[in-house]
Image (tube, rainbow, N blue to C red):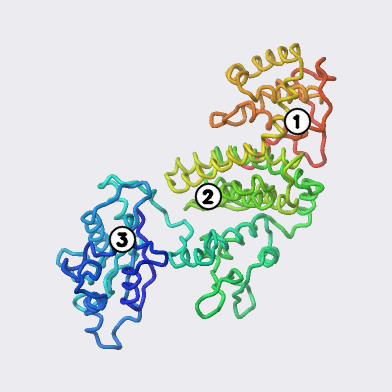
Amino acid sequence: MIPSVNKSGARTIGLLSYLYSPGKREEHTDPHLVASFDGMSPDPGRDPNATLKDLQQLLDQPVMALARHARPAKHVWHTSVRADPGDRILSDEEWASIARRIVAATGIDPGDGQSGCRWAAVRHADDHIHIVATLVTEDGHRPDDYRSGARAQAEARLIEKELGLHQVAPGDGTAAQRPTSAERHKAERQGRERTAREELRETVRRAVSGARSDEEFFDRLTAAGLMIRKRAAPSGDLLGYKVALPGDLNRDGEPVFYPGARLAPDLSLPRIRQRWSGEAQDDPASRQEDVIRTGPGSPAAARRGTASAVWQAVLVVEHGEDTVAAAHIAAAGEVLDALAKTSAAYTRRELRDAATAFERASRSHVRAVRGHDRALRQAARDLVHGGPALGRGEDGATTAMVIDMLFFLITATVHWHARKGHVQQAEAATRAAEHLRTAYQAAAAQPLGVLYQRGRRLGQPMLQRQTVLLREALPGLAEQILVEPGWYALAATIAEAEAAGHDPAVLLSDAAERRELRTADSVSDVLVWRMRRTADLAADASHLPETSSAGPRSATRGTTTRPSAPGRRHSEEEASRRTL
């Protein structure tokens, strides 16, 4: 049950006219009162002798009794209370009780002999009511309605339990502001799928991903086509910004601007600057290190680097200090935004939905210490600068690889939030993981299909030898893996690793031991991507020659030989521990 307290208004009659109207699309049915301050207010919906003017004058009477200069400019209080779509249809009597509890909890009509405001509750649909009140009490004072929205939410949680309704996860004040009903209606009239607020929030999030300066951030906003207004101090220092969608106008024909903080708490300019405050972007040595590490930019190279950064971040979220883990979780949101922005069409929608869902999971009251998350932010930057990926070849295969790694990072985030009682964040991360699962299935089908066919053609002697190797390396997982369809793709990967001079037993043990596998739909799929990333094997095997069934060209049991690369760290695990 969601109570939504709206901004104060100036015209009681205007709001009543809307509530008792058929609606813009005839969506209002049988408008009528279910409760009021005195239980006897005129009901223009059910009483043919009552008018909207009668009800308006009754509600406004305490306001009009004040001297003109003492009347509040905006005296109309309005909240809607909406049931969950899965809840049963409540009776008028139940909605009346809910209305009385909401006005008492918010201080509009506290009861117990205290002076209250005049109010009325109107129902014009099965699933919600609207409560209208005038913000002057019967004795001529302003009601104690401070933080009425939070108080209404707290009361709604109690009502849900008592009536057996869907229980909404309690918030902690870190969520982004919901679009108002007016914003939703406006989007519908304009034929837009989302409100301007939601469109702007996503665009600004993507502009932040991997950015390192005010200039770069605002350049990205401009490139995205947004209208920008900057707020500067008398000294010239930039203090904040507002953005608007072209064509989103108010009734006076002027653009509707939203400050960053009104889009999401972490999109104010000071909070955005915290992201790159610990990255020493002006240090030439630091910039040179990035050039060496990332190498030539391409979608596939950016995805490989992202997979490695995400792999390390899982350990940090699982075992790191809370402030460092919170920074990595926030940076994971940037990676998701960047990946969605640069993904191929067949994964773009699910990745965008994953990023949108995870936005709620990226914030909590745990203060994020930025700087430690530099590898993830660099990965987001590389994705953006690597450009859009094709949906085939190495681009498509490395996309599947990075989604697989991200799934485990987001799952670790679910567990982290759950341990801390962050219910809304844990639920949001769970939704993001489901979108990632769907995106992975689309991205992985072709490259895993190629590996599957290669594995089927290896020959029985090679498969038997690899079965023995698997059972020796992973005795606790081998039997599960052998009955999975992905076993043949893993067998092909083992053969390819052997041919490249690696010890597959070491690779398998390393891949299985470093992260949990309980949440994997297919353990063999996960091991394929982990082995191919660790051994620097091509993610897309379709262009490679068939591996000889005679066995590896060279391999030394007990050691793993890895191709050298400029700037390669000796061990990703050691790097993760240094981060901690």
Amino acid type at image mark 2: Ala
Crowd tier of the residue under label 3, counting other residues whose Cα lies within 10 Å: few below 14, some 14–19, many 20 or above: many
Q: Quadrant of the C terminus?
A: top right
Distance Cα–Cα, label 3 vs label 1? 60 Å
Instruction: Measure the C-alpha gap from mark 1 to mark 2.
Output: 33 Å
Kindly check if marks 3 and 1 are in contact, taking CB atoms under 8 A apart as contact.
Answer: no
Report x, y in % for residue 437: 58, 38
Residue 150 placement, left or right of 473: left
Residue 71 in sight:
yes
Q: Which residue is mark 1?
A: 535
Query: Which of the two residues, 208 or 195, is positioned nearer the viewer here?
Result: 195
Kindly identify the amino acid type of the residue bearing the numbered disc 1: Ala
Q: Earlier in the sequence, mark 2 or mark 3?
A: 3
Q: Of circles 1 and 2, which is in front?
A: 2
Q: Badge 2, how many Cα within 10 Å: few under 14, some, many 20+?
A: many
Q: Which of disc 2 and disc 1 is earlier in sequence?
A: 2
N-term mark: 3 or 1:
3
Q: Residue at x 76, y 15 (%)?
A: 459
In the rendered view, would you say 161 is above or below 464?
below
Label annotation for residue 357: 2
Q: Which mark is residue 129?
A: 3
Residue 559: image location, x then y, percent: 76, 22
